Image (tube, grey):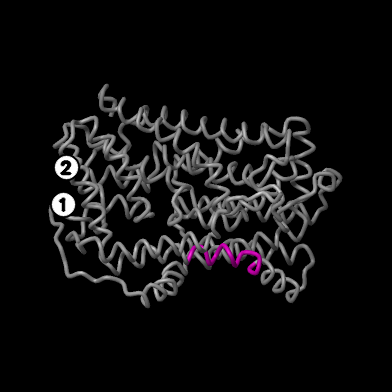
Amino acid sequence: MSERKSKVPHTFVLLFGLIVLAVIGTYVLPAGQFDRAKDERTNRTLVVPGTYHHVDQTPVSPFNTFIAIQKGMVDAGEIVFFVFLVYASFFVVLQTGALHAFIGWLLRLLKGKEILAIPVFMYTFALGGAIFGMYEETFGFIPLFVGLAIAMGYDAIVGVSMVCFGVAMGFAAAFMNPFTVGIAQKIAEIDPLFQGMGFRIACWLVMVSMAVLWTMRYAKKIKQDPTKSLVYGLDMGSLALDHDELVKSHFRPKDKAILAVVVGTVVLLVWGVIEKGWYFDEIAGLFLIMGFVSGLLSGMSPSKLASCYLEGCRDIVFGALVIGLSRGVLIVMREGQIIDTVVNGLAQPLSNFPSWVGAEGMLVVQTLINFFIPSGSGQAATTMPIMAPLSDLLGISRNTAVLAFQFGDGFSNILWPTTLLPVICSISKVPIEKWWKYFVPFFLLLFVVQMVFVWAAVAFNLL
């Protein structure tokens, strides 16, 4: 008797379904826009509150639905090629064997205590997210930590969690993140900046600790029974590393030199992001240099190095296309002029609720808006000019409105397919539906905790 199993649709099918829903929205929802003006104080273009108005309907035709896919690929080109170049550069480093030697040393050091690596690295990345807004900068670490997790007897999801789960929690519950808390407080005219740091540190500690415990619980379960892994049987290709071979490996002088290049790259990356404001272009260039130098130090010829880069790019094609396809959703909504309609429709009803209900409503609204405006600074520029005066009407502090914004923007960054989640999944080779199966139950639990913190901020005037 054959057993019937419900099968999750292919990722491309899921994303195209979202594009079709967005197209339907351009026919059903009224088109509208806010006026926008340049704010000299923040040097950003902000929404002007109270200026939402209807404009001529511009529904997206069936033919333009498919054109939106091409436009999405082009619009997300910066991210798509960033993923190609960063992954391929790390692929070159992996092919040199230097990181394998490093992981082997780490495994010998942690023998019998591998589980300790999870909290150490997750808290470290979470601090980076909280203090200077580290996020995309961690993508280069994903192949290394996926390999480390697999070699320790865990799986790719544990490896992703050590890097991206940690940094995402730190970024969302940040106490000094200049790209979310800093910008939102400036727009809300809160002075001095980073008020309420003590309360935010408490939020950070609770939420990051929850993520650490969730990851350790899952890691212990699959260590005892590998078949419980959500990616059991999935071919991880070059990211999968053999534990016994790694333990027997030893550092050669050229391995140490390559590792020094990798460490130097990370140091330069942190400096460039903090001091020079580097973003995708500069980070990709830096990783390209890392790959070139590492390949040459390992003894690769220029032709072999080029072939290695090509192989790495071939390895990540699926993930890169997912990024472009997910951007198609936003292209449709932008061309149908319904993004501002959605924002206005979500924000307006909040003024009719009591203060604490309105504050919780802000959290829900910001979480939903992050699907449509996945940029933290972009979401701040769109929603905070509306939410800040709305918080005055509700009788809650503007800092509480900022808290609702940062929670709503940050935690769903590894939930919605229109954010950088497809990038993370493509680099780690973890199918997005497998990540959802792991993360969604945690997100629901975490959302309750977010609501508790927002309620506490209102009830006890903590912000």
SS assignment at label 2: helix
Q: 370 or 23, which is in the foreground?
A: 23
**Residue 20 vs residue 10: left or right?**
left
Q: Residue 405: horizontal and vertical position, in percent? A: 32, 42
Which residue lies most toward the top here?
A: 460
Instruction: Please report the bounds of the magenta region as a residue range.
Output: 313-324
Q: Residue at x 60, y 41 (%)?
A: 162
Asked if residue 26 lies in the magenta stretch, the reply is no
The vertical placement of 320 against 366, above or below, is below
At label 1, the amino acid type is Pro
Q: 337 or 115, which is in the foreground?
A: 337
Q: CA distance from mark 1 to mark 2?
A: 8 Å
SS assignment at label 1: loop
Tag 1 near tag 2, CB within 8 Å: yes
Q: Residue 43: horizontal and vertical position, in percent? A: 26, 57
Q: Which residue is mark 1?
A: 49
Dot 1 or dot 2: first in sequence order is 1
Q: What kind of secondary structure does the magenta stretch mostly adopt?
A: helix
**Residue 248 vs residue 438: left or right?**
right
Q: Quarter of the image containing the C terminus?
A: top left
Residue density around tag 2, few if under 14, some if 14–19, many if 20 or more, within 10 Å: some
Q: Residue at x 24, y 32 (%)?
A: 357
At label 2, the amino acid type is Pro
Q: Which residue is mark 2?
A: 389
Task: Tally the marks.
Answer: 2
